[in-house]
Amino acid sequence: MHAYADPHSPTATVPMAAVDAEGTVTLWSPAARHLLGHAPGEVIGRPAAALLAAPLPGPALRALTRSAPWSGVLTARHRDGGAVRVTVRAHPCPEGDGRVQWVLLGAAPEAAGAAGPEAAPDAVLADAARKDAALKEWAYVQSPIATAVYDRDLRLTGANGEMLRLSGRPEEAMLGLQLTEIFPGSPFDEFGRLMAEVLRTGEALRTDTFFRAPGQSRERAWATFFTPLKDGDGRVQGVSIAALDRTEPHRARERLALVNDAGARIGTTLDVGRTAEELADLTAGGFADLVTVDLLDAVLHSGDPAAAALDGDRRPDGAVLRRAAARPGRGGLPAGLPGPFSYAPDSPPAEALASGRASLHRADAAAIGAWADGTGGTVPSVLAGPSGGAGLPAAPELPTTPSPSGFPDRDGAHSVLVVPLGARGTTLGVALFVRRPGTEPFDADDLLLAEEIAARAGVCVDNARRYAAERSVALTLQRSLLPGRLPEQAAVEVTSRYLPAGAQAGVGGDWFDVIPLSGARVALVVGDVVGHGLHASAVMGRLRAAVRTLADLDLPPDELLTHLDDLVVQLAQDEAAERVPGAVRETGATCLYVVYDPVSRSCVLARAGHPAPVLVTPGGTARFLDIPGGPPLGLGGLPFESTELRLPEGSLLALYTDGLVEGHDHDIGAGLDGLRAALSGPAAPLEQTCDAVLDALLPRRPERPTDDIALLLARTRALDASQVRSWDLPAERSTVADARKFASEQLTAWGLEELGFTTELVVSELVTNAVRHAYAPIRLRLIRERASLICEVSDASSTSPRMRRARVTDEGGRGLLLVAQLTERWGTRFTPDGKTIWAEQPLAAAG
């Protein structure tokens, strides 16, 4: 309605006002101000009823209720307080939401002559009618919705300005022609059929189509409305066409559909290369003309991407990548096959790798092709095809082409999205999405969409990489038959017994182990492989080696058993493939895994089909621990659960295999009762307790038992508060000096001044790394056990540190190398809140 406020319009000399559906004045013309004296600022936004000096007459009220036109005389209030009789023509203007605005055209009493209160002179009404017709004409011509009108013969009688702009032709060249004569072909042939149907049935129709209008350069989504035009008797006299641009809602739906497809189609396998190909397959052709996915070389080789990850403080020159996937979409774009390469330092992909942020660019083919620097003699094309990598097929090198981007040479700029692939705070690679010149360029919404899809793909790539790395570890452990020696532990006092089965049964697969962990903790393991003989012994050696390696990763007990279960399943599959006809072999095992921490005195246990351990309190009471049994190893796909307990110092844990409590002369229930009875009572030396258990449960006969027997007893120790100190540190550079001071003062209190220099250096390097490269909270802990001093620094980052050899000119980069040289052991363990870097020094060095 505000379009009528133009003072230069033909209505400028006619008093005019507009009132919305709530009765509020929205328009007040200069002529209306002249008539009643009110300025626009005094009227607009106020109720129209305030301008009346008398109530509306009955005919006006009835017309208002029916939303019907009305003309008559109203008594208005002048600004000076007097009443003015005004001849008014009220015209309703329905809005799209069903509400009605009103346009009021008035005339001063002198213009109305001697008109009575219920009727205006014919001249005034005729003038108002002409102005109503003008308003309707302007509304049609100036409407932003493209509209055209066709007669009963479906020949064009007129089109508004927006329709002429979309048509790309003058109105004179189209008048009198049918739509299919003006624009033959799709989709206008279908539009012509719909117009004929509307003319025949008198029912409006709508169609949604995606096409390029003749007067536009790109395809758009259109909602086209075909409306019958009826006379007062309801007869159809013509058809109007209204075209509404629905491109943005259409694109929003397409984006949502693409995100939904990404969740279903990316990550269907735990294969890094295949996951990259799924990302390219999903987005090429519809979202982009060409898609490339480049991953860090370490990721494709199932390595740790943190070793190749790039922070924002240094240039990404050294990041070596491989083309994991490339998909041409429309146009059949050629693809080359470059080998390992790195991006130019100032190129957008290099910046994305360094910062982890996506970006939108416009560049020609040559500029895009120059983004990559080859590590070999050939400069690879950024928009070339996949290279030979780990798990990827190698392909011959293509000859050099004039267009290094892989696009046909042509003028114009390509629209490029550069999006990093990352997960869990680590950058894994970068994806490029490219649209050719002449297509719709990417916009900010497309960039957000690409980031969302790349984030999902990054998680899937990282999951596949982690799975590949863990599976590689497991396959290596299968070939390992090198059990280690049981070391002395400060956390527990241990003793054990192992009795192999008799010669007739053959050597079995029972085993036990005591594995030192970081932070003065210890892992206790007992397992039992199904069957006997060399096969069972070989499987036992593999599982024992696997447990020790997985324990070094500091996995929780339930997660470790999950990995061990995967290994047993793999062994069974390998055996099934190599099985000799007629031979019967079973591959399966049970296992009990326990982690004890002498600082917190917490004990975390998980078992896979293995008998529950016995806990003997310092008072001598023995009971079987009620922990979830879990399925035996080798079934696959079933979960394991952990249980955590706090044990008093001096508690005794008894771990054993079923050969100890089962026998041909008694059932397992009697054996369990006998074991609990043998362990009950006052504490005794562990060697004596072991012998007592065997004497009580095994018959004193010269023959060997029919099944292997393994028994491991562990009496817990605890580190009191005087042996452990910890400090919470702020994530500031100045905190490094405070950390050194805290460590030095504590060593003095422990009488370990001789270790002061080394310890301060270790603390300084580890805390400095945490402040520079990790996140708060940062915590320093010193543990003094019987044989070693342990320094731990914890932070909230899950990125593993990397020891590297610094160059002569480097100012830093030697921290972990120094820590490794000055300490006996060091490593990293991950926690639910981040990670802990630890280092151990032998206390013998103090002497």
Image (cartoon, rainbow, N blue to C red):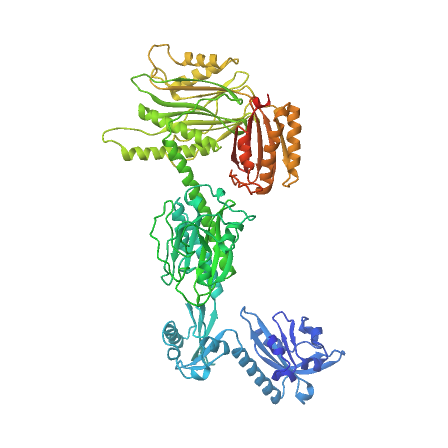
Question: Which corner quadrant holds the C terminus?
Answer: top right
Name the residue at the left extreme. Answer: 582
Name the residue at the right extreme. Answer: 80
Tell me: residue 157, above or below residue 584: below
**In the image, residue 222 lies at what x, y percent?**
45, 69
| Quadrant of res 593 | top left
**In the image, residue 556 lies at what x, y percent?**
48, 33
* Residue 429 visible in the current orientation: yes
Tell me: residue 317, above or below residue 508: below
Q: Is residue 222 left or right of residue 106?
A: left
| Quadrant of res 844 | top right
- Residue 585 or residue 733, whichever sits in front: 733
* Residue 566 visible in the current orientation: no
Tell me: residue 352, above or below residue 270: below
- Residue 635 or residue 125, whichever sits in front: 635
Question: Which corner quadrant holds the N terminus?
Answer: bottom right
The tally of labels here is 0
- Residue 146 or residue 649, whichever sits in front: 649
- Residue 689 or residue 823, whichever sits in front: 823
Tell me: residue 105, above or below residue 219: below
Q: Is residue 372 left or right of residue 76?
A: left
**In the image, residue 575 lies at what x, y percent?**
30, 32
**In the image, residue 700 lies at what x, y percent?**
37, 10
